Image: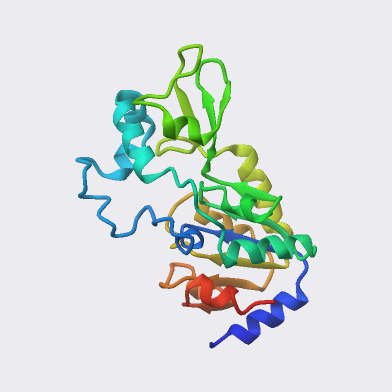
């Protein structure tokens, strides 16, 4: 595979790697890409996904929101794949500073990664909007219609909806990690969703690696580009 040997060499020489990942990291665990052509746009739902998982729609039509959310955005029962496991290994070995992820499935933590910055939140954390009580993802899955707390408040997933701001603390930590990185691996993301994609501008080094099946707007700025599946690449790394 072209460029694989260079990638292997850079990984060997680096000890402050930061990994920035998108939906393509999880698709190989069987979790469908939110934007993939699995019929999300024309099956069962009469609104586009971006509309349904917006803050205003959640407030206006919570029962509809939760019907979509349970069916399309609650990926429970999936296992980490080779990419998740390799990143956790690098962290244990002291080579990896942090994982910055756009995914909300918690698979990096399931694989053993500790330093994970979840830009868009996590389905595993759910809170009552009224009293703040915590609920696991299974509570949302098993509840009928709109999940409600003992106090009567709606239990909302700790995921960033359209029209909502990213968590400032998570952004700050992600920027700090990327600034410190001696190697930045960006993988499984089209780099078209902002402000997440804008984080690449904070990288100061000369080992920016992009691994994605398709071309991205940042390919020309990268030091190394691999248009391959993540599983194919990461299964060959040490």
Q: Residue at x 47, y 28 (%)?
A: 156
Q: Residue at x 48, y 30 (%)?
A: 139
Vertical side of 43 occupied by 169: above or below: above
Tally the marks: 0
Q: Residue at x 33, y 59 (%)?
A: 36
Vertical side of 220 occupied by 21: above or below: above
Vertical side of 207 occupied by 17: above or below: above
Which of the colour schemes (rainbow, by chain, secondary structure, one colour) is used?
rainbow
Q: Residue at x 44, y 59 (%)?
A: 30
Name the one closer to the observer, 144 or 193: 144
- Give the image quarter of residue 145: top left
Please give left or right for residue 63 compared with residue 232 in the image.
Answer: left
Looking at the rendering, in which quadrant would you find the C terminus?
A: bottom right
Q: Position of residue 35 (x, y in %)?
A: 34, 55
Q: Position of residue 205 (x, y in %)?
A: 69, 68
Please give left or right for residue 176 compared with residue 37 in the image.
Answer: right
Name the one closer to the observer, 226 or 234: 234
């Amino acid at each position: 595979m072209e460029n694989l040997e260079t990638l292997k060499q850079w990984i060997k020489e680096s000890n402050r790697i930061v990994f920035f990942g998108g939906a393509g990291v999880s698709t190989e665990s069987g979790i469908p890409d939110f934007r993939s052509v699995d019929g999300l746009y024309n099956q069962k739902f009469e609104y586009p996904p971006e509309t349904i998982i917006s803050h205003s729609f959640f407030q206006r039509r919570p029962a509809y929101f939760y019907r979509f959310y349970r069916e399309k955005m609650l990926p429970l029962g999936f296992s980490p794949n080779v990419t998740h496991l390799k990143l956790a290994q690098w962290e244990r070995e002291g080579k990896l500073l942090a994982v910055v992820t756009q995914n909300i499935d918690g698979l990096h933590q399931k694989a053993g990664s500790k330093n994970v910055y979840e830009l868009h939140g996590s389905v595993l954390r759910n809170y009552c909007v009224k009293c703040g009580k915590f609920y696991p993802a299974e509570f949302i899955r098993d509840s009928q219609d709109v999940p409600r707390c003992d106090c009567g408040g709606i239990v909302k997933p700790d995921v960033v909806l359209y029209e909502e701001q990213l968590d400032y603390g998570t952004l700050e930590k992600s920027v700090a990690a990327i600034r410190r990185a001696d190697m930045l691996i960006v993988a499984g993301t089209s780099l078209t969703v902002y402000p997440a994609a804008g984080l690449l501008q904070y990288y100061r080094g000369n080992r920016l690696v992009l691994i994605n099946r398709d071309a991205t707007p940042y390919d020309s700025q990268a030091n190394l580009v691999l248009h391959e599946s993540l599983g194919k690449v990461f299964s060959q790394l040490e």
